[in-house]
């Protein structure tokens, strides 16, 4: 199944796409960024893109580490703030600070909105059940958590949230998003995800929800190496051991090229030792521009117990 952000999200829109680019609006600002999957021609003429855009990203122009594929510079065409906030007002409601980074990212992946909705809905169900049974709020662990939109979705639903990322600056960014959203109480962890999951396994800890959005490649704060193809199965097997056997959920998101929803389902099923795909759903997360062109960007696998 292909899922899209709601058209009611007023602070984000994919305006057009094509020729390896996407034209997006984040709040008041419009930007052009590289998108290799936009294999078609744009619907709007170049002159209209140039008229609309506040900033455009040029890859490989000297910023970031040498040889880093996504490094480059932003070219300003109109006056705009270096940092600004947008609001997400779906099931969960929260604020996100955006900014222009040297790796073309701005602090949010808008195609993830359907995952936020799933996390919020499932966590609310678990929170309400825990309340009726006089139990503690469900514990949700967000690994590779970036700037924290999924953490905020779980927190908005009443969960006890642990947010982990290996990059301290990103965790600081996420904390600011929590504060701007008028929430509190999220546990912040700067650590290698595999190391943390194994320690929780040894301690016998259990979580009602686990969210994973691992990169293709990465490094922990102490130089630990992460390569998706080599580490994903072991990571899933480890988190499977700390996921509650009932009244729980798992969300896996993958951006790496070459991964399909069917492959995602199989690796999750085998890693967690499931008999079949009962309680599992999968598909693609995508954006759709004003002209109906669908831009698939990641795959998801979700488990509901």
Image (tube, rainbow, N blue to C red):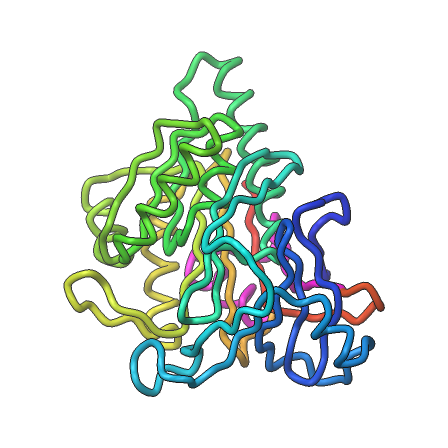
**What residue occupies the far front of the structure in this picture?**
79
Number of marks in the image? Answer: 0
Left or right: residue 202 compared with residue 215: left
Q: Which residues are magenta?
A: 262-288
Which sits in the foreground, 302 or 218?
Answer: 218
Residue 275 on image: x %, y %: 53, 56
Residue 239 on image: x %, y %: 35, 52
Looking at the image, which residue is at 41% across and 73% down? Answer: 216
> On the rendered image, what quadrant is the C terminus found in?
top right
Looking at the image, which residue is at 39% across and 30% down? Answer: 160
Looking at the image, which residue is at 40% across and 70% down? Answer: 102
Residue 103 falls inside the magenta stretch: no
Left or right: residue 250 compared with residue 242: right
Which sits in the foreground, 53 or 192?
Answer: 53
> On the rendered image, what quadrant is the N terminus found in?
bottom right
Kindly indicate the quadrant of the structure image that contains residue 117: top right
């Amino acid at each position: 199944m292909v899922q899209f952000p709601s058209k009611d999200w007023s602070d984000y829109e994919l305006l057009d796409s094509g020729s390896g680019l996407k034209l997006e609006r984040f709040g008041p600002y419009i930007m052009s960024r590289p998108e290799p999957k936009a294999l078609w021609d744009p619907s709007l003429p170049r002159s209209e893109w140039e008229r609309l855009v506040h900033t455009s990203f040029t890859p490989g122009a000297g910023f970031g580490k040498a040889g880093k594929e996504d490094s480059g510079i932003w070219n300003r065409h109109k006056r705009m703030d270096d940092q600004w906030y947008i609001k997400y007002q779906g099931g969960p409601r929260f604020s996100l600070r955006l900014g222009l980074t040297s790796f073309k990212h701005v602090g949010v992946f808008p195609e993830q909105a359907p995952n936020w909705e799933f996390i919020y809905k499932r966590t609310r169900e678990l929170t309400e059940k825990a309340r009726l049974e006089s139990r503690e709020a469900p514990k949700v662990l967000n690994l590779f958590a970036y700037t924290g939109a999924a953490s905020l979705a779980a927190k908005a639903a009443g969960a006890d949230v642990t947010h982990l990322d290996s990059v301290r600056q990103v965790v600081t960014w996420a904390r600011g998003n929590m504060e701007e959203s008028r929430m509190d109480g999220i546990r912040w962890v700067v650590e290698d995800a595999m190391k943390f999951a194994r320690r929780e396994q040894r301690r016998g800890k259990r979580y009602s929800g686990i969210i994973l959005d691992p990169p293709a490649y990465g490094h922990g704060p102490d130089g630990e190496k992460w390569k998706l193809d080599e580490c994903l199965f072991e990571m899933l097997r480890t988190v499977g051991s700390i996921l509650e056997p009932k009244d729980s959920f798992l969300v896996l998101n993958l951006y790496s090229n070459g991964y399909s929803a069917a492959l995602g389902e199989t690796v999750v099923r085998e890693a967690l030792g499931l008999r079949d795909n009962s309680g599992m759903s999968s598909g693609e997360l995508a954006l759709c521009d004003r002209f109906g062109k669908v831009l698939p960007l990641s795959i998801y696998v979700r488990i509901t117990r």
